[in-house]
Image (spheres, rainbow, N blue to C red):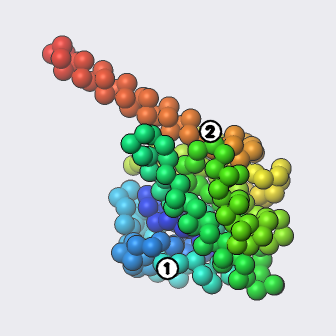
Amino acid sequence: MKILICGLGYVGVTAAACLVGGGHDVVGIDVDPRKVGDVAAGRSPVSEPGVAGLLARGAADGRLSAAQSVGAHLVGADIALVCVGTPSSPSGALETRNVGAVAAELGKAIAALPPEAKPPLIVMRSTLPPGTMDSLVLPTLAAEAGPPGDAYEVAFNPEFLRESTAIADYHTPSRIVIGERLPGASQNLRGLYDGIDAPVFELSFAAAELVKLADNAFHAIKVTFGNEIGRLALDLGV
């Protein structure tokens, strides 16, 4: 498949490496020219074991490229994965400005597709507050390209990768979570997981968003607990 990856941070670059390693054609999209230059040359802008080698082979085989905007790169694409950051504000709320900007850019690119082009599947992977798909992503796409259904479809497919074991986690996930607009509307997404044996949960957008948020929160609780025990041990001289 031809896959666009919007956002070349840790999640996007790791996904690009695993996808080109699986034989897909990947176009990385990012506003940062340094990241675009690195990925286009087969270099990794993030530190993760195994990623650099997969990117280098993908670039050498001509299956990996990169650009600073979506534009005509969406033509012929099966899937566009959105992996832009949603950093936390001081209050703890997630900032979704980048998600909205990418959704608008993808909407414009969908509207510009030739009539004979295959309808792409737009897949959000960024961590989102529950309700964001319905309140932000779908309206932003629809404002530019009309409602989903014929010209494009939308899904939410969070990742559960851990730093230093991300490639292994990609190939052996504990579960695959797919948030859908309608049951069965995101069948193209299953092609990303060919050969991967893991339970698949097809949920509503809000349920899938909450699964990802709960997973992140639980890991944060474990880290906080470990840090507190460490401080107690230091205080006690243990």
Q: CA distance from mark 2 to mark 1?
A: 32 Å
The answer to whether mark 2 and mark 1 are in CB contact below 8 A is no
Residue in view at x 75 percent, y 44 percent: 204
Q: Is residue 31 above or below residue 10?
A: below
Q: Nearer the viewer, residue 42 or 128?
A: 128
Q: Secondary structure at mark 2?
A: helix
Q: Is residue 1 above or below residue 209?
A: below
Q: Secondary structure at mark 1?
A: strand
Residue 129, which numbered label?
Answer: none
Q: Is residue 155 above or below residue 214?
A: below
Q: Is residue 145 above or below residue 15?
A: below
The residue wearing badge 1 is 67
The residue wearing badge 2 is 211
Q: Quadrant of residue 146?
A: bottom right
Give amino acid for label 2.
Val
Residue 3, how many percent across, how many down? Answer: 62, 71
Q: Nearer the viewer, residue 63 or 84?
A: 84
Residue 95 located left or right of residue 123: left
Residue in view at x 48 percent, y 43 percent: 93
Disc count in the image? 2
Give amino acid for label 1.
Ala
Residue 55 shows in this picture: yes
The extreme left residue here reads 237
Residue 1, how many percent across, how many down? Answer: 68, 72
Residue 7, how many percent across, how many down? Answer: 50, 65
Q: Quadrant of residue 225?
A: top left
Residue in view at x 23 percent, y 18 percent: 233
Q: Nearer the viewer, residue 173 or 136?
A: 136
